[in-house]
Amino acid sequence: MGGVYGKLNSRDDFFHMLDAARKITSDMLRVQPKNWTIESIDTQLDAMQRWTQNGREPTQDERDSITIGLLAVRQLDADRQDQSGELARMLYDLNNFFDDWPTDDEAAAATDADFWKRFGL
């Protein structure tokens, strides 16, 4: 769709992107095993997977604890045309989706305007 969830129009899309992001962090940690940013992102992606497996709904506290989007903005460059840039772009979408945990119908219909409504804009 391209709205607040980017390429994620369903929970199935979320799980596919989550798997792809976890592969990238694993690859990056093999090259830079002491990169604290990637370690934190990898740990959070693992938690997101555990908290949503087998149809489980993540709690609000669990959803609030995820900061991968913020880490991506502060520590990664989404304009790069390498794994780091690709990961950053994925993390924005994954964080927004996980934070809201929409149904498939809500995700498919979401727009940026829906996001801004939360703030009265």
Image: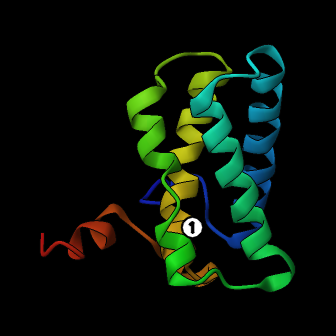
Q: Position of residue 50 (x, y in %)?
A: 79, 68
Q: Position of residue 91 (x, y in %)?
A: 56, 45
Q: How many marks?
A: 1
Q: Nearer the viewer, residue 45 or 117?
A: 45
Q: Position of residue 89 (x, y in %)?
A: 54, 37
Which residue occupies 83% across, 74% down?
53
Q: Nearer the viewer, residue 30 or 36?
A: 36
Q: Which quadrant holds the C terminus?
A: bottom left
Asked if residue 88 lies left or right of residue 13, the reply is left
What is the basis of the colouring in this image?
A: rainbow
Give the residue at mark 1: 98
Which residue occupies 43% across, 58% down?
3
Residue 49 figure quarter: bottom right
Asked if residue 51 lies left or right of residue 97, the reply is right
Residue 57 figure quarter: bottom right
Disc 1, SS: helix
Which residue occupies 48% across, 53% down?
67
Q: Residues within 10 Å of mark 1 (few under 14, many from 20)?
A: many
Q: Position of residue 113 (x, y in %)?
A: 27, 67
Q: Nearer the viewer, residue 113 or 68?
A: 68
On screen, residue 26 above or below 54:
above
On screen, residue 61 above or below 6:
below
Amino acid under disc 1? Phe
Q: Nearer the viewer, residue 62 or 15?
A: 62
Q: Residue furthest left?
A: 121
Asked if residue 115 lies left or right of residue 43, the reply is left
Residue 1 in view (yes/no)? no
Which residue occupies 76% across, 85% down?
56
Residue 79 in view (yes/no)? yes
